[in-house]
Image (spheres, rainbow, N blue to C red):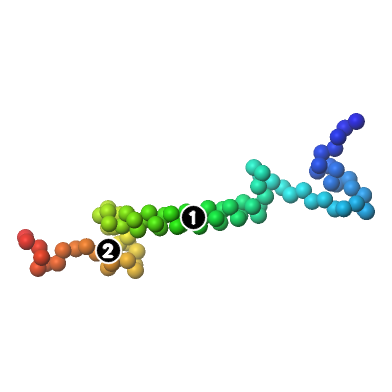
Amino acid sequence: MFAPTARRAATQASAYAPKYYIPRTTAGMTLGTAVQLGSLAAGFGVAVGSGALFLFGEVPRVRNDILRKLPFLDTYYDRSIPAEDNPF
């Protein structure tokens, strides 16, 4: 008469039948799959972001506003003109 859904059929199994487990999904992904894809996306994001940051490292705005604020890169990106080379 009525066809039971998969979730109802799993709860009405006998004691001798195999135990079914239907994982909860959101947008077709389980929690484990979402964690795997999220960590993969975060790794690629860090790689692309750091590559873009150092690619644009010679742009004065990026160099002075971002890269010179990092404690271990502040002297490396210092492009000030020494006093003996300044014509003024």
Give percent across and percent down for residue 82: 14, 67
Which residue extends farthest top? 1
Left or right: 61, with 35 as reference point: left
Category of crowding for the residue at label 1, using alpha-carbon neighbours closer than 10 angstroms: few (below 14), some (14–19), many (at least 20): few
Residue drawn at 81 percent across, 42 percent down: 6
Give percent across and percent down for residue 26: 66, 44
Give percent across and percent down for residue 87: 6, 61
Asked whether the viewer can see residue 11, the reply is yes
The quarter of the image holding the N terminus is top right
Residue drawn at 84 percent across, 42 percent down: 8
Which residue extends farthest left? 88
Residue denoted by label 1 = 44
Left or right: 64, with 12 as reference point: left
Residue denoted by label 2 = 77
Category of crowding for the residue at label 2, using alpha-carbon neighbours closer than 10 angstroms: few (below 14), some (14–19), many (at least 20): some
Above or below: residue 85 compared with residue 15? below
Left or right: 27, with 54 as reference point: right
- Inspect the image, locate mark 2, and give the three-letter code of the amino acid beneath it: Tyr
